[in-house]
Image (cartoon, grey):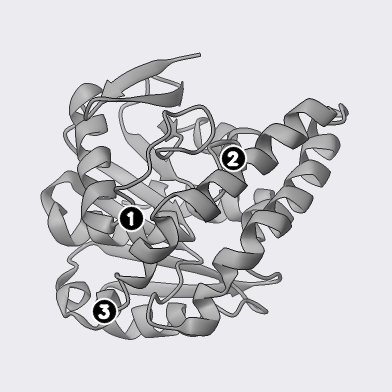
Amino acid sequence: MPILKINDREVHIQELNKAAAETVILVHGMFSNLSVYYFSIAPILATQFHVVLYDLKSHGMSEKTLHGYDLNSMTDDLLALMEALNLKKVHLGGYSFGGLIALKMATRFPERIKKLAVIEAPDPSDEKARGIIDEYSREFLEHYVENFTDTTKVKMGKRQMEKNHRMYEYLFYQTSIKQDMINEQDFFGAGGLTRVPHETFLLYGWFSNCLDAGKLLNKKIKNSRLLAIEGDHNIPIQHPQQVADELLIFFKQP
């Protein structure tokens, strides 16, 4: 289990195809972990790229902490991870809250990003979209278990299921993650997104209550393209092959 010390905390990472010339970092969402990519999306991208996955603080096998889930802190962690891995410039993709981290990274450290892919990032000012946080822990677990069984032909054990539920309950009820998300409610309106210089791919589900956020980002980010596919907020779990193929095409284009 690869563990790095990042900003004085242990961070669980996984790397695929280290020998590739270019790197893609994928950031997962709230109440999730790097496995949302690991079983399907990451291996497809790794046919062409060095792929780096990591568990956000208090998620998966990374160290727990009560505070520091604001976007500045989360991007400080990502930058420190890049420094630890000696990665000067990467393609960056993020899903849900991870999409917000990716967007913030592009505004704070644009020189470290090549291309930007944003999957189902919510507008923090949209109370309906923020409601995903309440639903996501349950929905993700249900979709993940189904996907895990389909791809590995092994049912997740009761102990693992209980471990995941404990992680979600800790994050939701004990940490500052919900309040930190609410405190970011001005992120889309602050003006920084209009200065994002990167080629940006926005990928959303047709039936997601975050689709309006994707349309807003498409207007704000000059060099962006929006694609809506079948599904809702959980498209990486519902359609991992399509998501992976679309990301691969985007990152490979010169």
Q: Which residue is mark 1?
A: 101
Q: Secondary structure at mark 1?
A: helix
Image point (25%, 60%), residue name: 104
Residue 44 appears in view? yes
Side (left or right) of 165 relative to 37: right
N-terminal of the two: label 1 or label 2?
1
Q: Which residue is mark 3?
A: 186
Image point (38%, 85%), residue name: 216
Side (left or right) of 130 relative to 20: right
Q: CA distance from mark 1 to mark 3?
A: 14 Å
N-terminal of the two: label 1 or label 3?
1
Local packing at callout 2 (Cα closer than 10 Å; few below 14, some 14-19, many 20+) is some
What amino acid is labelled 2 in the image? Met
- Compared with 155, 41 (above or below) is below
Task: Name which quarter of the figure residue 138 lies in.
Answer: bottom right
What amino acid is labelled 1 in the image? Ile
- Label 1 or label 2, whichever lies nearer to me, is 2
N-terminal of the two: label 3 or label 2?
2
* x and y, in percent, of residue 60 in the image: 54, 33
* x and y, in percent, of residue 240 in the image: 66, 50
Image point (45%, 33%), residue name: 53
Q: Which residue is mark 2?
A: 167
